Image (spheres, rainbow, N blue to C red):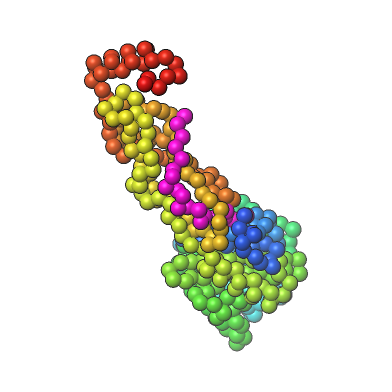
């Protein structure tokens, strides 16, 4: 196995030990937190981000996502009316203030769920779609499995305390990104500053809205067990980030932690391009060819979002089974480029020949064979 270290990678000394290792670079008082780049889905930071914890009303994002998915499938419309039961009307906690035996459109119920965090609105949705909260929770679990939310389980649509109601920060970020891309026509609901129902006006509970540039909302949550948390999404200068925090001890602490983490998400991470598609990454030795080596190229762009304060180095190495035997065609996959960065998984990329090498003629091959036979083992032939 031939290995070639790439000297050109000396420029990569400013790279990132990302995700778990970034805990020392990004600080938050939240017990669980995560930062995600929305465009790539890449996680930039995590603090105990894979532990399923009580999500409180942040799990209403899943309730909303199930409804939005049914609209997308054509099984519901925004104008579909749902009838309010007495159970929904009597439900405590945060409320939309629905009135018993009235009909409310799906779109208005979504506003009540997201803006007002209405437990009553969640129950109206659950009963009209699935017949009960329990049956709707089964739909939530099925969708979670289909969407790859492997660290989540649901026992109700409201987020009220339940032994099966658990989500990790990673899953909350993945769910927020799913909603953002799959249902773009309903993004506006998450950033509505206030909503009025039953002549009662309530402000959006998301602390990022109105407090920072480009805030697009998402969902807050609070119970005594979970503490205060929020899923936030913001856009700035053509980029979008998701920040999730939970386990804070007050609304003020949640607001501060959410704003600080979102500012960190935009201010402390830059995109670094290691290779452009088509870049030469080295040469491979050739046997029995008219050339002694062949140039190698990578056919895809390699880039990452990296923390500015990271001083750890990155290394790249090209490996191949060599020497390569001629003839060699251009575009053959013959090697692998391995990129290693502290705190991140090793990444492998296919490497291709950037030219062709024709084989030697018959007599040249005979001459080469005789040279090999007459060259003592361990000798360089000189």
Magenta stretch bounds: 1-20
Q: Is residue 201 left or right of residue 348?
A: right
- Residue drawn at 32 percent across, 34 percent down: 294
- Is 88 on the left or on the right of 306, as rendered? right
Return the x and y of residue 275 as percentages of the image width and height: 40, 50
Q: Which quadrant of the structure image shows residue 318?
A: top left
Residue 155's place in the image compared with 189, above or below, is above
Residue ID at (61%, 76%): 207
Q: Residue furthest bottom?
A: 199
Closest to the observer, 247 or 302: 302
Q: Is residue 96 magenta?
A: no
- Residue sitting at x 58%, y 75%: 208
Work out which residue is located at the far right of the displayed protein and give it: 224
Q: Is residue 311 above or below residue 58?
A: above
Expressed as whole percent of the image width and height from the top left, the position of residue 158 reads 66, 67
Nearer-the-camera pick, 375 or 157:
375
Task: Give the x, y percent position of residue 22.
Answer: 61, 58
Q: Name the residue located 47 percent from the left edge and 52 percent from the top edge.
A: 12
The x, y position of residue 164, in whole percent, is 71, 57
Classify the position of the C terminus by image quarter.
Answer: top left
């Amino acid at each position: 196995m031939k290995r070639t270290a790439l000297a050109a990678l000396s420029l990569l000394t400013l790279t990132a030990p990302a995700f778990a290792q970034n805990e020392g670079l990004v600080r938050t008082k939240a017990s669980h937190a995560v930062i995600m780049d929305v465009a790539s889905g890449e996680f930039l930071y995590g603090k105990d981000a894979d532990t399923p914890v009580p999500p409180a009303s942040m799990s209403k994002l899943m309730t909303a996502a199930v409804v939005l998915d049914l609209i997308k499938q054509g099984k519901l419309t925004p104008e579909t009316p749902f009838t309010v039961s007495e159970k929904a009307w009597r439900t405590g906690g945060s409320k939309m203030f629905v009135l018993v035996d009235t009909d409310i459109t799906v779109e208005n119920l979504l506003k009540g769920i997201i803006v007002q965090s209405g437990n009553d609105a969640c129950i109206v949705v659950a009963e009209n779609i699935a017949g009960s909260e329990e049956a709707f929770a089964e739909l939530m679990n099925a969708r979670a499995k289909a969407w790859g939310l492997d660290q989540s389980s649901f026992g109700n649509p409201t987020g009220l305390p339940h032994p099966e109601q658990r989500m990790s920060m990673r899953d909350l970020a993945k769910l927020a990104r799913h909603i953002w891309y799959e249902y773009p026509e309903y993004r506006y609901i998450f950033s509505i500053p206030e909503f009025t129902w039953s002549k009662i006006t309530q402000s959006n509970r998301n602390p990022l809205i109105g407090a920072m540039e480009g805030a697009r909302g998402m969902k807050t949550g609070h119970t005594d067990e979970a503490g205060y948390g929020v899923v936030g999404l913001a856009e700035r200068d053509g980029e979008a980030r998701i920040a999730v925090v939970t386990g804070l001890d007050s609304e003020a602490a949640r607001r501060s932690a959410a704003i600080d983490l979102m500012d960190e998400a935009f201010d402390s991470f830059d995109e670094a391009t290691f290779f452009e598609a088509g870049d030469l990454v080295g040469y491979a030795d050739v046997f029995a060819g008219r050339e002694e080596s062949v140039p190698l190229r990578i056919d895809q762009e390699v880039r990452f979002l990296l923390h500015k304060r990271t001083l750890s180095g990155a290394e790249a190495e090209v490996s191949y089974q060599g020497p390569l035997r001629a003839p060699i065609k251009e575009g053959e996959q013959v090697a692998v480029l391995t990129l290693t960065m502290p705190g991140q998984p090793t990444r492998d990329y296919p490497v291709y020949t950037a030219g062709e090498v024709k084989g030697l003629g018959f007599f040249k091959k005979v001459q080469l064979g005789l040279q090999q036979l007459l060259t003592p083992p361990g000798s360089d032939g000189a």
